[in-house]
Image (cartoon, grey):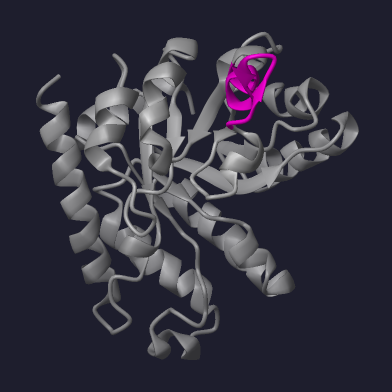
Amino acid sequence: MTTSNLVQQIKTKRSFLCIGLDVDLAKIPEHLLAEEDPIFAFNKAIIDATQHLAVAYKPNTAFYEAYGIKGWRSLEKTIEYLNTNYPEIFTIADAKRGDIGNTSSRYAKAFFDDLGFDSVTVAPYMGKDSVEPFLAFEGKHTILLALTSNEGAFDFQTQSIDGKEVYKTVLETSKGWKNAHNLMYVVGATKAEYLAEIRNIVPDSFLLVPGVGAQGGDFAEVCKYGMNANVGLLINSSRGIIYASNGEDFATAAATEAGKLQQQMESVLNTL
C-alpha cells in the first residue's frame, strides 16, 4: 500500500484510527472459547464491527506467538481475512524485529511476502544494516521505534549524547538510509510534548502513536503537535476498544468505543 492510498482512506473515513489486535484468551468473552479458533473468531468480529471506523489494524505478534503454532495460524488467518475482505485497510505487524542484514531480510520476507502485512515495526538499535533489508521491499513500510510510550523509554531514548537525545539521532540518521521514504516512526502518545521537535526532524513522515486510552496519552496534544499536511498520524488504541465488553455484545461495544475516537478525529479533520 502506498502512502497516498493511506491518506485517501483517512480522508474517506474521516479517521486516522489504528486498532491494536492484542488478543489474550484470558480476556476475550468466554463463549468464544468454544470456537475452533477463538482468537480468529474474536478478531473477525472486532474487524467486521469496526472496519468502517479504522484505517489500520495492528496485531502485536507476541499475543499470537505465546500460543505457539496455533497462535501463529490465528495471525495468518487474521491478516488473510483483512487482505481479502478489506484490502484498503493498512496492516501493521507489531513485531519489533531488528537484527543483522541476512536475519533482517528473513524477518522482512516473513511479514511482507509470506503473511502479506503492509508494514512491520522494527527496533533501530543495531543500525542501518539491520533496517535497510526491510526498506528494500517495494510498497511496504518499516515503522521504526523512535520514542516509545513506556516508562523505560527514559532509560536510553531521551538520554543526551554529545548534546543530542538518542531518539533525535535515530530520526536524523535514519533519514539517510536507502529507501528511507518507506519509513514511518513510533512515537508514544505519553511523550506528546516531544512531538513538535520530532515534526521538525521528520515533517512528512507518518507517525504511529500508541498510548492513547489505557496508557493515558492526550489525544488533543498528539493532534496539536503531531499532525502534518497529510495528517501524518495513526493513533492506536488496543485494550480500550477490543476489551470494551467481555459479554456477547463485545463487538458492538468495541464499535461504540472506536466510534468515539473516530468522532474526535473527524472533528479535528474538519478544522484543517
Identify the residue shown where x is 46% and y is 59%.
21
Name the quadrant containing residue 71.
Answer: bottom right
Query: Seen in the image, is 150 located left or right of residue 240?
Result: right
| Between 158 and 111, the one nearer to me in the picture | 158
Q: Quadrant of the C terminus?
A: top left
Q: Is residue 262 above or below residue 38?
A: above
Residue 209: x, y in percent?
Answer: 42, 39
Q: Position of residue 156 (x, y in %)?
A: 66, 36
Comparing 256 with 145, the one in front is 145
Residue 45 in view here: yes
Q: Is residue 164 magenta?
A: yes
Q: Nearer the viewer, residue 67 or 177?
A: 177
Which residue sits at x=18%, y=62%? 256
Q: Residue at x 50, y 68 (%)?
A: 23
Is residue 90 placed above or below 131 in the rendered structure? below
Residue in the image at 40% along x and 49% along y? 211
Residue 3, position as x, y percentages in the image: 44, 22
Q: Is residue 217 magenta?
A: no
| Left or right side of 197 for 222 | left
- Image height of 186 relative to 72, above or below: above
Q: Position of residue 182 (x, y in %)?
A: 58, 20
Read off the magenta span.
Answer: 158-171
